[in-house]
Amino acid sequence: MAKEREIQDLSPWEDAQKMIAKAGREGVNLIWDRLKDQTPHCTFCEQGLTCSKCVMGPCRINPGGGPKKKYGVCGADGDLTVARNFGRFVAAGAAAHSDHGRDLLETLAAIGDGKTTDYGIRDEAKLERICTELGIEVEGLSVRERAKALADLFFEDYGCRSNNVAFSGRAPQKRRDIWARTGCSPRGIDRECVEMLHRTHMGVDCDPVSICLHASRTALADGWGGSMIATEVSDIIFGTPKPVKSMVNLGVLKEDQVNILVHGHSPIVSEMILAAAREPEILAKAKEAGAAGINIAGLCCTGNELLMRQGVPMAGNHLMTELAIVTGAVEMVIVDYQCIMPSLVNVAGCYHTKFVSTSDKAKFPGGIHMEFHYNNAREKAREAVLMAVEAFTRRDPAKVEIPSKPMSITSGFSNEAILGALGGTPEPLIQALQAGKVRGVVGIVGCNNPKLKHDHVHVNLARELMKRDILVLATGCATVAMGKAGFLEPEAASQAGAGLAEVCRALGIPPVLHVGSCVDNSRILHLCAVLANYAGLDISDLPVAASAPEWYSEKAAAIGLYAVASGVYTHLGLPPHILGSSMITSLALKGLDDVFGACFAVESGPLQAAELIDERIKAKRLALGWSA
Ligand code: CUV
Ligand code: SF4
C-alpha cells in the first residue's frame, strides 16, 4: 500500500492522507489501489475505438493501422465508432439525471393525488411561481391541485408529445433559434435518450456529426429538462435554499454520536433520514445506547442537497467516500443512487458500518436493502436510523480515528437567494460585470477522478480565477474541495482580486458560491438565461464559462455538453474517450464554436486552464465593448 510520499501525491488534505494511511495499515483496498491494478488501460477503449454494440464484433478500430483494422465487421470506421460510443455515454448521463428528476416528479404527483402524507409542499410560493411561468392557471386551485397540474405538465416533458421541454422557454430566443436551426431543440426527455440508443444501433445513423448533434439535443433535454425539473421540484417539496452555515471534511463526524452518512443524489430518502434522526423518541434510543446524539452528514450530491437546504455538514466528495468509512466512526452509510462505488460494501464490511440501499433501481449485493417509497419513507427512515443506533453499540473504539477539525462554510445560494441579495434584479450583477469589478462568472462543477490528484485542479483553478476577479459558482463534488480550501466563507474575499473582493464584501458573500448538487447545474443555466434575457443577449455573449476539472462520470459529460450547447465555453480536466477520432475531437475543441458559439477545452493543469478561461472571458467582454 501507499507510502507517505505517495499518499501526499494522492490528496492534499489531512483527512484523506490520514485515512489512506489507516486503510493501508488495516488492509482496506481503496480506489487508488484498483486504479493501479487497471493501469495501463486498454488504448483502444481509451480512444473510444472499441465497439461491442453487436455480436458480429466486438471490434477494435485502428484508423491508422492499414486496411486490416480500419473498419469494424459492419464497416464502421473510427469516427463513427467514437461518435456512437460518445452518444451513448452522454445519453446514459442524461438518463441518470432525468430519472432522478422523475422520482421527484412522482413524489410531487403523489402529493397532488393525496397518496402520501410523508411528503408535502414546503415552498408553496415557488409552486405557484413555476405554475404561472409555465402557463398553468392557478386561480381557484388548491395547493394539492396545483401540484397535480404541474406534475402532469412535467410528465408530458418526459414523453414524446411536446415540441420542446417546458423550461427551454427560459432560454433566450436567439439560443432557441440556434437549437431549432441545428435540429437540437430538446423534445421529450425520454425520447432523446431512446432516440440516441436507436440511432447508435448498428446500421442507423452513420454520420458522426449527426450523432454528435443528437448528443447535444439529448444533453439539452437533461439540462433544461430532467435536471431542471429535479432542481425546481426539489425546491418545491423540500424548500428553496437560503444562505446557511455549515461544516465540511471528515472532522464533521462525531466521536460520541451515532454517525449516519447519506450518499447518492436524491433528497427524497436523505431528507427523511434527517427528519427521523431529529425525532425525540429516536434520540432517546440513541441516548440509551450511550450516544450523545445522532449526527447526519453528507457525501456527494445528496449531501449537497441537504447542505443547501438544511445546513447538514458535508463529510466528503467522491474520493472521500471510502475514506469516510475507514474512520471506523460511521454506523451507517445509507444510499439512493449514482456515484456509489460498489466497493463501499466491502469497505463497510471491514468495520461495524451498515451499508443500506433504498432504491428499487440500485441494489448492492452484500448490503442491506430497505426499499423506500413515498408512502413508507418516514417509517423506513425510522427503522434505518434505529439500525444505526444499534450498530453504535458495536463500534470498536480502537478502530476509531476522526482525522481533522472541520472547516466552516456558507452554502444555500439558490438563484432566488442570489437575486434576493442583489435586491431582486440582475441589474447590480450586470453593472458589476460591465464595470469589470466582476470580470466573469465560472461554474466549477463535477467529480473527482483518481487519475488526478484529489481536488488539486478544483482548488487551484478556483484560486486563480478569483484572483482575476472571476466569480466562481460551485456544485457537486467540487463544492467539498472549495469548502476545504476555505473558499466558501466571506473571509475568502481577501484572496480575490480587488474588484471581486469589493463586491463580495458589499454583499457579505464568499467569492465562491455553493449553488447545489449536480442536477443544480440547471440553476447556473437558469441564471445565465436570466442575465442574458435581462441584457438582451444570448448566453454565448456573456463572459461566463464552465469547468469540470476532475470529472469522471457519464453525467458530467452530459452536463458539459448541455453547457456548450447552451453557449457556455466548457473546460474539462480530462478528455472523454474521443481522441481516436480527429474529426470528433476537433468538433469538440473547435467546430462546436461555429454551431453553438461555445466549445470544449481540455487541460489538466489548473493555471493553464485558468489562462484559457480568462482568455475566453476577455474576448467576450471586448466583444460587448467592455474593458478586458
Ligand atoms: Ni452528482 S457525478 S462524483 S456525486 S460530482 Fe460527485 Fe455529484 Fe460527480 Fe457524482
Ligand atoms: Fe463491430 Fe459494427 Fe458490430 Fe460494432 S456494430 S461490434 S463495429 S460489427
Image (tube, rainbow, N blue to C red):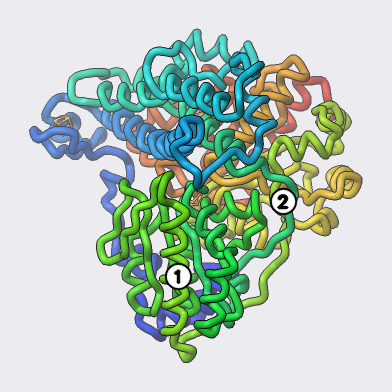
Above or below for 505 versus 8: above
| Residue at image coords 37%, 32% | 91
Q: Residue furthest left?
A: 56
Above or below for 605 versus 394: above
* Residue 554 numbered tag: none
Crowdedness near tag 2: few (<14), some (14–19) or many (≥20) residues, C-alpha within 10 Å: many
Q: Nearer the viewer, residue 211 or 149?
A: 149
The quarter of the displayed image where residue 416 is located: top right
Q: Quadrant of the N terminus?
A: bottom left
Crowdedness near tag 1: few (<14), some (14–19) or many (≥20) residues, C-alpha within 10 Å: some
Residue 250: x, y in percent? 58, 71
* Residue 464 numbered tag: 2
Element type at mark 2:
helix
Q: CA distance from mark 1 to mark 2?
A: 46 Å
Above or below for 297 versus 269: below
The residue labelled by disc 1 is 386
Above or below for 1 versus 240: below
Residue 375: x, y in percent? 42, 45
| Residue at image coords 52%, 30% | 223
- Does the image show residue 362? yes
Horizontal side of 561 relative to 85 (left or right) equals right
Mark 1 or 2, nearer chain start: 1
Horizontal side of 340 relative to 437 (left or right) equals left
- Does the image show residue 578? no
- Which amino acid, by three-letter code, is at mark 2? Glu
